[in-house]
């Protein structure tokens, strides 16, 4: 074994560049695989995993304490089908007017809202002694639980990018009191927006008793409805004030997942394929390029088994080091991406499964071992004399005819020789070509998906049609709400310099006739089609008692464009006609005209104003003018980046960079091996007058040829992959992507991508080509 180890160690030290190449390829491949597996795992039903970990409530029910006492509620925990329950917890709804940051928190800039753990408006607060329990076992991931009066724990998943700066924030209530944020927790059941101690809830004047239930059968909406009926039938009429199913909460989380899961799945598969392919190419090539060394070992008395062991150790040492370091680096890099893919339902640390690291290490080392063993076993059967010559002179039939044909052309000698080099090792060339094609495919698909995602986010956030949003009725601490009417506010906003169009809107909660489920209409006053949501079927609102609805709403309520719906908000009902289908939107929301609101609630005023500015208008100056004219109006700049866009763009960029590097390293390795195998040929070419520049050109040309071929293969496949992914997104029932988001392939984009394969190939080939060019004739002709 000592002889084997000495020979292997000598091979590692002698082939430092090749050893470094093996380690680098395995390192980058390990990083890629860890990130791919982590993102895929994190995006696979994150809500279901968080819900199961917390023993989430299938039903969150608020009871009227005046109709049903706590003792009677306790009896509901023993009803048939109830497997676990928690409560009753006193529940109150408070009105948040604003939040003051913790001491030392930097003040926001002009026109910016202060960072806040809770938005202004109504907030449901429950009184609980602690975060644990048999149902809805909260994830208290920041700070501590409320232990005294005036303390509050707010509900936020990590995806909201909150941090320790929110601890100590003062939450201001409409009655003048304030509560201090001491902790941040997450409830997968969404049982409440915040929690205080049982003693603290009494000061908030609770008006409901909250119960949390788990049932033996609650997999479908029908089963959950049956479970709710079991509860209501056992209690007095009117005892149930509200009931929330976990299926509704899950649907809200799955909406964004439907957008990027196809993307992550596609990237993950490509990343895994590229990593495995290039590792196999590098390892197999390393053994084949050492055939002469194998022959020398055999000639000096090494047995075939010892020769095999030498090469397994030679490639295994850098491969193990690369795999271990790459797995560690990938784990650190994958955290933010995996957390984003899971929508922040788990922290960055817990988003990475230990099984992912184990699978990456085991899988990569298995690929290295199998590839190296296969190549070494083929070599061990060769006689010593044949093994010594195998790495220097390609056998008959290995592209010699092609090389001779190219030599007879009028191309410069360096170019003709370079074009013929790939045909000498067809198997290695095929693997390298596949790696380049995968790199081009990834770059192409990423470019298309990033363009689609940017358009998606811009449309969803109304970029281009609305530059400023103004809200009223909810002032910051120390500020009063606006007392201006809708008409007066519109007149004010329209009179300020730069305003082209201002529209008012107001939201609410309504019920559809014949349904018990709430819907959330938004009423617009005078919104033109240019400021409205994109319509994919029908038309935008152009008359009274008209509405438009997203695909999810139409599917959920089994209605179509042309259907009539009756809305009820507690007063006089109103019937609207659905005249258009929007490209996207809340499955429980519709947009209707202002006449409908005046029928349902004549006294309701607008609470939001969307402002379209003229080109070149300074939005910050306009917002400053709004704040100066009416302190109760609160403008904000509409420059928010859509969360889905961030996930798609960041993930696409990461995988593009990783796979481009992996592909370039595959090319690097191929040129390095070709240089080693053809060292004697290079010496002869230099001896007859080939300059270093021509040597570099020859080696780069050999790979640029594969770059062109890889582009011809990868570019159309990347466009096809983009089409398949966007169609998968568009047919999920929640979104209908407009044609311009799918047909992103303009001449400029395609022309730019046409050089991606050449760039990958040339970048990977240049360094080893320059190394070959610097070889002296004596060194090149020196044999091992």
Image (tube, rainbow, N blue to C red):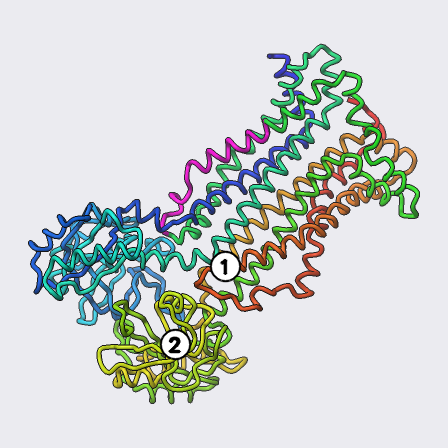
Residue 779, located in which quarter of the rendered image? top right
- Confirm whether residue 509 shows in the render: no
> Which residue is rendered at x = 28% and y = 85% of the image?
599
> Which residue is rendered at x = 29% and y = 75% of the image?
508
Decide whether the magenta segment is chiefly helix, strand or loop: helix
The mark tally for this picture is: 2
**Tag 1 residue:** 729
Image quadrant holding the C terminus, namely top right
Say whether residue 138 is left or right of residue 732: left
**Tag 2 residue:** 563
Say whether residue 569 is left or right of residue 559: left
Residues rendered magenta in the picture: 345-369
Say whether residue 221 is left or right of residue 362: left
268 versus 549 height, above or below: above
> Which residue is rendered at x = 32% and y = 75% of the image?
507
742 versus 483 height, above or below: above
Residue 530 drawn at (x, y percent): 50, 80
The reply to whether the magenta stretch includes residue 367 is yes
Q: Nearer the viewer, residue 188 or 216?
A: 216
Q: Nearer the viewer, residue 615 or 707?
A: 707
Residue 91 drawn at (x, y percent): 16, 61
Residue 628 drawn at (x, y percent): 36, 82
Which mark is first along the chain, 1 or 2? 2
**Neighbour class for label 1 at 10 Å: few (<14), some, many (≥20)?**
many
**Neighbour class for label 2 at 10 Å: few (<14), some, many (≥20)?**
few
Say whether residue 321 is left or right of residue 487: right
Observer-side mark, 2 or 1, equals 2
Image quadrant holding the N terminus, namely top right
- Confirm whether residue 366 shows in the render: yes
Q: Nearer the viewer, residue 625 or 725?
A: 725
Element at label 1: helix
Residue 586 drawn at (x, y percent): 38, 67
């Amino acid at each position: 074994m000592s002889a084997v180890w000495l020979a292997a160690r000598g091979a590692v030290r002698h082939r430092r560049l090749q050893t470094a190449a093996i380690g680098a390829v395995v390192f980058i491949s390990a990083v890629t695989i860890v990130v791919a597996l982590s993102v895929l795992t994190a995006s696979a039903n994150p809500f279901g995993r968080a819900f199961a970990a917390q023993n989430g409530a299938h039903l969150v029910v608020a009871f009227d304490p005046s109709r049903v006492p706590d003792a009677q509620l306790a009896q509901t925990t023993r009803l048939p089908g109830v497997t676990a329950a928690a409560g009753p917890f006193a529940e109150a709804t408070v009105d948040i007017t604003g939040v003051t940051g913790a001491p030392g928190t930097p003040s926001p800039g002009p026109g910016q809202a202060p960072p806040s753990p809770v938005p202004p408006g109504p907030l449901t607060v429950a009184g609980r002694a602690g975060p644990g329990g048999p149902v809805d076992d909260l994830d208290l991931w920041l700070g501590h639980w409320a232990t005294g009066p005036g303390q509050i724990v707010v509900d936020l998943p990590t995806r909201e990018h909150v941090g320790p700066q929110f601890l100590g924030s003062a939450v201001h209530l409409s009655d003048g009191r304030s509560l201090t944020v001491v902790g941040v927790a997450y409830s997968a059941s969404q049982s409440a927006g915040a929690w205080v101690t049982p003693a603290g809830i009494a000061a908030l004047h609770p008006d409901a008793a909250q119960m949390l239930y788990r049932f033996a059968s609650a997999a479908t909406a029908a089963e959950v409805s049956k479970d709710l009926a079991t509860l209501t039938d056992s209690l007095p009429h009117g005892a149930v004030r509200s009931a929330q199913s976990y299926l509704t909460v899950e649907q809200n989380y799955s909406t964004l997942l439907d957008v990027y899961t196809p993307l992550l799945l596609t990237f993950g598969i490509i990343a895994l394929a590229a990593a495995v392919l290039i590792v196999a190419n590098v390892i197999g090539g390393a053994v084949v390029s050492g055939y002469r060394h194998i022959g020398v070992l055999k000639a000096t008395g090494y047995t075939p088994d010892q020769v095999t062991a030498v090469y397994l150790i030679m490639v295994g040492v850098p491969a193990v080091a690369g795999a271990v370091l790459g797995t560690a680096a990938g784990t650190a890099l994958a955290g933010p991406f995996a957390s984003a893919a899971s929508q922040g339902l788990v922290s960055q640390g817990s988003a990475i499964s230990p099984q992912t690291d184990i699978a990456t290490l085991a899988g990569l080392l298995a690929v290295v071992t199998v590839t190296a063993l296969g190549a070494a076993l083929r070599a061990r059967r060769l006689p010593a004399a044949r093994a010594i010559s195998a790495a220097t002179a390609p056998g008959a039939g290995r592209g010699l005819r092609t090389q001779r044909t190219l030599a007879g052309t009028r191309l410069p000698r360096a170019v003709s020789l370079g074009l013929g080099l790939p045909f000498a090792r067809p198997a290695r060339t095929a693997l390298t070509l596949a790696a380049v094609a995968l790199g081009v495919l990834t770059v192409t698909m990423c470019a298309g998906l990033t363009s689609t995602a940017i358009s998606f986010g811009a449309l969803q956030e109304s970029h281009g049609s609305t530059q400023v949003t103004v809200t009223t009725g909810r002032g910051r601490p120390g500020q009063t709400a606006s007392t201006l009417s809708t008409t007066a506010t519109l007149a004010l906003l329209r009179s300020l310099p730069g305003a082209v169009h201002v529209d008012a809107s107001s939201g609410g909660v309504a019920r559809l006739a014949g349904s018990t489920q709430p819907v959330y209409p938004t009423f617009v006053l005078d919104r033109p089609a240019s400021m409205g949501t994109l319509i994919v079927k029908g038309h935008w609102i152009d008359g009274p008692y008209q509405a438009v609805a997203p695909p999810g709403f139409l599917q959920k309520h089994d209605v179509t464009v042309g259907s009539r719906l009756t809305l009820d908000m507690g007063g006089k009902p109103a019937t609207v006609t659905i005249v258009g289908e929007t490209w996207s939107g809340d499955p429980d929301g519709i947009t209707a005209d202002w006449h409908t609101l005046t029928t349902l609630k004549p006294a309701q005023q607008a609470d939001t104003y969307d402002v379209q500015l003229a080109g070149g208008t300074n939005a910050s100056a306009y917002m400053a003018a709004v704040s100066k004219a009416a302190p109760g109006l609160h403008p904000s700049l509409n420059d928010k980046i859509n969360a889905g866009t961030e996930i798609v763009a960041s993930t696409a960029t990461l995988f593009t960079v990783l796979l481009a590097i992996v592909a370039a390293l595959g090319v690097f390795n191929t040129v390095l091996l070709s240089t080693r195998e053809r060292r004697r040929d290079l010496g002869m070419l230099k001896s007859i007058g080939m300059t270093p520049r021509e040597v570099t050109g020859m080696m780069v040309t050999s790979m640029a040829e594969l770059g062109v071929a890889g582009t011809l293969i990868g570019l159309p496949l990347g466009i096809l992959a983009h089409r398949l992914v966007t169609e998968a997104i568009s047919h999920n029932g929640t979104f209908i992507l407009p044609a311009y988001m799918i047909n992103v392939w303009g001449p400029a984009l395609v022309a730019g991508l046409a050089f991606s394969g050449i760039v990958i190939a040339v970048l990977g080939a240049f360094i080893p080509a320059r190394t070959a060019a610097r070889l002296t004739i004596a060194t090149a002709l020196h044999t091992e």
